[in-house]
Amino acid sequence: MGRVAYVNGRFVRHADAAVHIEDRGFQFADGVYEVWAVFDGRLADSAGHFARLRRSLGELRIAVPMSDAALKIVLAETLRRNRIRDGLVYLQVNRGVASRDHAFPDPPVPPSVVITAKSVDLAAGEARAARGVGVVSLAENRWGRCDIKTVGLLPNVLAKQAAREAGAAEAWFVDDLGLVTEGASSNAWIVDAEGVLRTRDVQANILRGVTRNSILGLVAELGLRLDERPFTLDEVRSAREAFITGAGSLVLPVVRIDGVGIGDGQPGPVAKRLRGLYISEAQRSAA
Ligand code: PDD
């Protein structure tokens, strides 16, 4: 059997999977999502993503479609039916299908739930990490609630495309004060000129990355010097190293910004060490 998707209670052939034209995810981006990395058929950082999903749904007052336990079973079944060993699983929950009206449907309708999964080539990911990637900087132009993992991602889409057209892998948004907020689909980190790990604090308008949080745990265990404080582009250019974190990128060394090399232009030791530790810990604790 080929690829399969879960759509509103049914497993269907991926090629035939569809939502209604009045689905509010389609019409208004009125929904939220999560992405889990998958190792050996199990979810990495499982609990953190479930907790954030709950929070995103709560902030948008979208009904919780099913218990975490039930959702875990459906996610696992999606992975099984797609024969995913290592990969990614995507979940979208949105406000459901209703005649087009900006305000919430009244009475409420059941939320829509879509799950897809795909395999990822771990060896290719390692090769990419060994080379490092470039990022481009762009003016921050997103809304004020980037802590909610909403499917409204147009600025992120445009930023990622700009990165791709510049031969880079990620875009870093820069706020009005000249400080990096985060990537289009990842959190941003540097090891600054003094050797201190820096990443923006989550009181700012950024996503509370689940991978970021796990990395903070590793950083504390290793006793590395850390300052949760935003950094400027000048600080990136003078940094010893840089990297991004996220369910898709895991920990990925950044070796160039806007075409200029960072540090010695090679993946740095801190990023490489954190990547290795993160992946082995995520593999060990995947559930
Ligand atoms: N993106 N910041 C943004 C804007 C993101 O979209 C993501 C994740 C992250 C990292 O979060 P986490 O560590 O919880 O994955 C930070 C996912 C992978 C995506 O959009 O595909």
Image: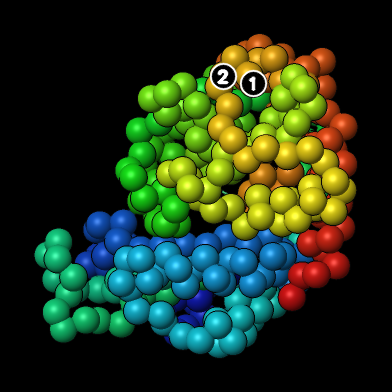
At 24% across and 81% down in the image, what residue appears?
A: 109
Structural crowding at the residue carrying mark 1, measured as other residues with C-alpha within 10 Å and reported as few (<14), some (14–19) or many (≥20): many
Left or right for 261, reference 71: right
Residue depicted at 58% across the width and 27% down the height? 231
Res. 133 in view: no
Q: Does the CB distance between marks 1 and 2 fall below 8 Å?
A: yes
**Is the residue indicated by label 1 positioned so its CB lies within 8 Å of ligand 1?**
no
Residue beneath the point at 75% across and 31% down: 196
Where does the C terminus fall, quadrant-wise?
A: bottom right
Q: Amino acid at mark 2?
A: Leu
Q: Is residue 8 above or below residue 254?
A: below
Q: Secondary structure at mark 2?
A: helix
User: Disc 1 marks which residue?
Assistant: 236
- The residue furthest top is 260
Q: Which residue occupies 87% across, 48% down?
A: 222
Label ID, residue 31: none
In this rendering, position of residue 39 left or right of residue 9: right
Q: How many marks?
A: 2
Residue 164: percent from left, percent from top: 55, 28
Query: Front-most of 58 and 99?
Result: 58
Q: Position of residue 185 (x, y in %)?
A: 54, 44
| Residue 233: mark | 2
